[in-house]
Image (tube, rainbow, N blue to C red):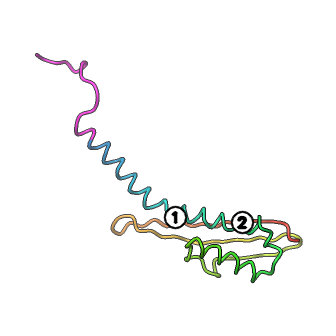
Amino acid sequence: MKRSMHSQKGLTMISWVVVLSMVVFLAFIALKIMPIYANYFTVKSAMQSLKEDGLMTHSVANIHDKLSKRLSINNVNFITQDNIAIAESGGTVLLEVYWEEQRNVIGNLDVIATFNEQIEFEAN
């Protein structure tokens, strides 16, 4: 019995292997990149909690200390005092945290992500 091309439906085995390998590759890349963004959201959350807790009325050194402690609790150890900038101007305070993260993906292929998070608020 001879089948025509019109009666065949679906993907062949080779097509399934190609589709599955692409899905696995994208999942692998996502698993390598997701921790970078998890750290970003942790830093952003720590900065926001300083603002919500009203700790921004303290001195610059105290704000540095409080933010460093909150990041340390969340196991974010790559941000140093050099990555934190606090600027006071008039009645506002600007808290800025900037950093780069580099992760190895495959062999000599790396991903570098640069972040610059800022929060501005009224000083009391």
Q: Nearer the viewer, residue 76 or 101?
A: 76
User: Type of residue at label 2?
Assistant: Ser
Q: Any magenta on residue 2?
A: yes
Element class at badge 2: helix
Residue 119 pos. (x, y %): 74, 65
Q: Is residue 82 above or below residue 10?
A: below
63 relative position to 33: left or right: right
> What residue occupies the far top of the structure in this picture?
1
Q: Position of residue 46 (x, y in %)?
A: 67, 68
Q: Earlier in the sequence, mark 1 or mark 2?
A: 1
The C terminus lies in which quarter of the figure? Answer: bottom right
Give how far across and how far down residue 71 sits, in percent.
62, 73
Q: Which residue is mark 1?
A: 36
- Crowding at dot 1, Cα within 10 Å, few <14 / some 14-19 / many 20+, comes out as some
Residue segment shown in magenta: 1-16
Task: Say which amino acid is labelled 1.
Answer: Ile
Find residue 96 and report its image quarter: bottom right
Left or right of residue 33: residue 75: right
Label 2 Cα neighbours within 10 Å, binned few <14 / some 14-19 / many ≥20: some
Q: Nearer the viewer, residue 113 or 74?
A: 74
Q: Is residue 98 magenta?
A: no
Residue picked out by circle 2 = 49
